[in-house]
Image (cartoon, grey):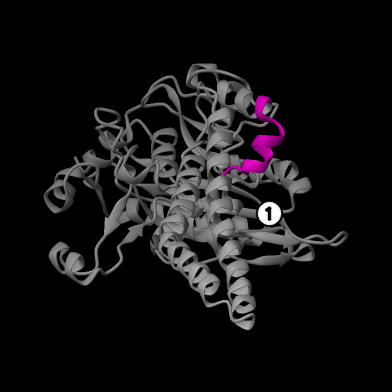
Amino acid sequence: MHDIRAIRDNPAAFDRGLESRGLAPLAAALTALDDARKAAIAAAQGAQERRNALSREIGAAKKARDEAAAQGLMAEVARLKEEAPALDAAADAAGRTLAERLAAIPNLPAPDVPVGRDEHDNVEVRRFAGRGLAAEGRQHFELGEAAGLMDFEAAARLSGSRFVVIKGALARLERALGQFMLDLHTGEHGYTEVAPPLLVRDEAMFGTAQLPKFRDDQFAALQGSPEIARESGAPSRWLIPTAEVPLTNLVRESILAEDALPLRFTALTPCFRAEAGAAGRDTRGMLRQHQFNKVELVSITAPERAAEEHERMLACAEAVLTRLDLPYRVVTLCTGDMGFAARKTYDIEVWLPGQQAYREISSCSVCGDFQARRMEARYRPREGRGVAHVHTLNGSGVAVGRALIAVMENYQNPDGSIAVPPALVRHMGGLTRIEGPVS
């Protein structure tokens, strides 16, 4: 969420930031809305001040036994009282209009983010060779279905498209991947493990900017049937699209001591996404699912430490792939490909032999104070007076389902079996190989 005062102070910089995202300038329109809000507030306050002054004048008139004057003043007070609700409503409406407009505007890119239109303008940072780029291989769903360990038809009967049932040793491999990531991030990277709720309120989704803009991408959970929910006014809850939502909102409406920062949280949770804009994309397999598991990383920092923390978070996510010896590359997203709340984003893309392509397995973003303003999350600096908004960061550490895909495709054998990466053997109870199809 943007600060209207900052927009007023530097409208040209604000509009340049929007232009780099391919958006039209808005500073003048937002300033005009703020002027209208201030005018409406001033009108309501002016009317209240006039009423207060009239009350004093009425007292003076009564003391002077000037009943005619007192009656005239009382009539004006009555008129002002009748007008007060409309003036207050106008001030509230002007405030809501400005807040809604500000809430719909994406974050401004950091100065070092490359300007571009889409993923074709992203900039590669580095590569890790790992096991090497296999020149051929079957896709994960071919391997999984042939082994009888991945069942999309059963999932479709249960839940519809974009779901999968994983069985046996493959299910254990997915569980091992999540456990491995959590152990790494908590044991070596200093993150605190959290088991958060999977259902959250509107305010939490607004705080991390999933609402209102991305409402259609979310799954809502009603309390009772739709009819009962409507009649009772029971609030809806949202299935989390990522653990970023509950983890970041742990500091909502808080004032933290600077000495407590940075806070680093991690969680392994199911994630739920409607994929409303993904029709026709990745329809085969489990690359783009309505439900998937992910290990999330969230950091809460003081502003001057945010850039350093961003690089640290990226290194933590990369460590997952280097330990698994998976080939990947890191790219900096351009302004046209960044997420709504991000100031700067690194994507990690893992090599998938079955597709002969790099595919995203982690995004690590620094959001500045954009989310903190929506959550009213602040801290008290060691020196100086007052409070300031914290800076928030989030990243995948990493997507478990996509890591499963990457392991299956990069560790596949010609006979359809899958070797277990050495880093996962202890989490697999010593199992080193997932057998292929029974001949």
Specify whether residue 83 is in view.
yes
Q: Is residue 235 above or below residue 344?
A: below
Question: What residue sits 30% from the left and 66% below the top?
Answer: 235
Question: What residue sits 48% from the left and 64% below the top?
Answer: 76
Disc 1 packing (10 Å; few <14; some 14–19; many ≥20): many
383 to the left or right of 401? right
Question: What residue sits 17% from the left and 69% below the top?
Answer: 231
Q: Judge by depth and name the residue closer to the eye, 64 or 309.
A: 64
**Residue 415: % across, % down:** 31, 34
Q: Judge by depth and name the residue closer to the eye, 287 or 403.
A: 287
The quadrant of the image that shows the N terminus is top right
Query: Does the magenta segment cover residue 400?
Result: no
Which residue type carries mark 1? Answer: Val
User: Which residue is disc 1 drawn over?
Assistant: 390
Q: Which residues are magenta?
A: 1-12
Q: Judge by depth and name the residue closer to the eye, 314 or 92.
A: 92
- Residue 32 position by quadrant: top right
Q: How many marks?
A: 1
Mostly what secondary structure, the magenta segment?
helix
Under circle 1, the secondary element is loop
**Residue 154: % across, % down:** 15, 49
Question: What residue sits 37% from the left and 24% below the top?
Answer: 355
**Residue 429: % across, % down:** 45, 62
358 to the left or right of 306? left
Query: Does the magenta segment cover residue 4?
Result: yes
